Amino acid sequence: MGEKCPVVVVGAGPAGLTAATLISQYDVDVTLLDDQLSPGGQIYRQVSDSKIANPETVLGADYTGGKALVDRFLESSARYVPGASVWGVNRKREVSYLRNDASFFLQTDHLILSVGCQERPMPFPGWQLPGVLTAGAAQIMLKSQAMAPEKAPILVGSGPLLLLLAWQYLNLGLKVKAIVETTQTQHYFHALKHLPGAIVGRQQLVKGLKFLKDIRAAGIAVYKGASEIRALGDQVLEGICFSSRGKQHTLNAELVFIHQGVTPQLQLPKLAECELEYLVSQKCWSAKTDQFCESTVEGVHLIGDGQQINGAEVAEISGQICALNVLKKLKRIDQEDFDRLSKPLLVKKKRQLKLRQFLDALYTPSDIFITPSDETMVCRCEEVSAATIREIARGGCQGPNQAKSFSRCGMGHCQGRFCEATVSALIAKEQDRSVADIGFYRVRPPIRPLTLGQLGRGQSDDRETN
Ligand SMILES: Cc1cc2nc3c(=O)[nH]c(=O)nc-3n(C[C@H](O)[C@H](O)[C@H](O)COP(=O)(O)OP(=O)(O)OC[C@H]3O[C@@H](n4cnc5c(N)ncnc54)[C@H](O)[C@@H]3O)c2cc1C
């Protein structure tokens, strides 16, 4: 099946770029596939051709700092295939992707999946109304098209990305109407015990405090400890109501941007039959790897936020560790070099993970946001409510896969990406079982929409289309 490549990397974020650049330095033929049109992933999206006039002032130095990583990759000998949307992989490391309206197929000995994360669903009554979108989607429009809302949005939820977006809008001179923060008081206490360890990431913490200071200085109202959120409106969003610190609030709004943290994108590891494990500390599934990033399937390596949520710095470190492991297997470095080069990286990674424990304790959402009220639409593609999922669970449904047959939830356009976590959590709660026991959606290729024509125009090598 398809062209044979020694190493294939999927995803051009910090993890994939680092791995591909390092491996190619040892004269190994590396192919990197990414669905975006320029490298950078989520954090450094379009950093080398930003449409924003002064990206450092607007998006911050962390964003423009990624240009060096992108440049190193572009100068390397790695073969870069932009606009390549991978819709299938398997345990034999066969890769299928769509590009220029045709499907292409590759086979490799070393498949490195670095596909990043997705936003965690934040279901509440009315979240399906036009006018409610995720903060990540709003930031993608800003980074890729320099598009920002004309009407001041309300930002709802928790996590660093929410504050970052508000700060980036302020830098553009845009107004944010209010921030409705959903972190519950007990989370601050819980996070405090991880604060000493998090000191390694103090620069990040200081940055977060600066965002908050600037937001407050701009006079933006911040409502703390919010819950009972409801979007108002019949056909389109008209406002939101919520309770905060014992008081009910109603705010008019045409735009609400929601965010509740991120979870790994696991469709491709699932297709490759990699083992997953449920992380209680992050309330999501992650993919099992050894310390050198190799999954439970031989030759399939998982790095970055697509394996486990640890942020961009750890994504880069894991890209380096994985690259060394692949180079050792390809006999480009010996065991001695491998040990010498990988040891300091493992130590650095371990230190960085201490900051993550703090962030997880603070921002992993409470169950009230994971198991929404009955009237809430859980699967927006197939319009399935939380009440239906609860009813199915009470009727003895064994898990999310059986729930598909009963209700069609998870069978729509997004293929369950945006309802999986909620459906599993609802069934688990109703049956008094753990999410780990309930399981996750099985996936089948294609994981992305593909027409028969695009499949039929299959080719084994798209070098000529580069
Ligand atoms: C919307 C969004 C915005 C974010 N913004 C920030 C931010 O501003 N600052 C910050 O610190 N963190 C941000 N994060 C978190 C951030 O993504 C990571 O910490 C960091 O980028 C992880 O790096 P990575 O290399 O693991 O993955 P990513 O940077 O996400 O890179 C993964 C790449 O894989 C591509 N990809 C995914 N699936 C496929 C497929 N099937 N076929 C082909 N290509 C595929 C993606 O398009 C992407 O280019 C954001 C996350 C999200 C979801």
Image (tube, rainbow, N blue to C red):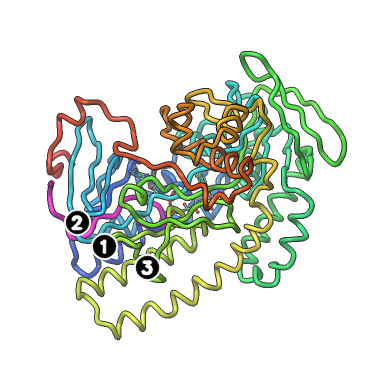
Q: Position of residue 451 (x, y in %)?
A: 25, 26
Front residue of 357 and 401: 401
Q: Position of residue 34 (x, y in %)?
A: 32, 45
Check the image and report above or below for 207 versus 197.
Answer: above
Q: Is residue 12 left or right of residue 251?
A: left
Q: Is residue 463 left or right of residue 302?
A: left
Which amino acid is tagged 2?
A: Thr
- Which of labels 2 and 3 is toward the front? 2
- Residue 191, can we see it? yes
Query: Mark 1 or mark 3, which has the lower sequence index?
Result: 1
Q: Badge 3 is on which residue? A: 320
Q: Position of residue 447 (x, y in %)?
A: 34, 38
Disc 2/disc 1 C-alpha distance (Å): 9 Å
Q: Is mark 1 within 8 Å of ligand 1?
A: no
Q: Badge 2 is on which residue? A: 108
Q: Is residue 108 left or right of residue 203?
A: left
Which amino acid is tagged 3?
A: Gln
Q: Is mark 2 within 8 Å of ligand 1?
A: no
Query: Mark 2 or mark 3, which has the lower sequence index?
Result: 2
Quadrant of the rendered structure where residue 99 is? top left
Q: Do the residues bearing badges 2 and 1 touch, measured as CB atoms within 8 Å?
A: yes
Disc 1/disc 3 C-alpha distance (Å): 16 Å
Q: Position of residue 87 (x, y in %)?
A: 29, 40
Magenta segment: 1-14
Check the image and report above or below for 199 versus 414.
Answer: below
- Which of labels 2 and 1 is toward the front? 1
Front residue of 422 and 56: 422
- Residue 20, can we see it? no
Q: Is residue 116 left or right of residue 465?
A: right
Quadrant of the rendered structure where residue 429 is? top right
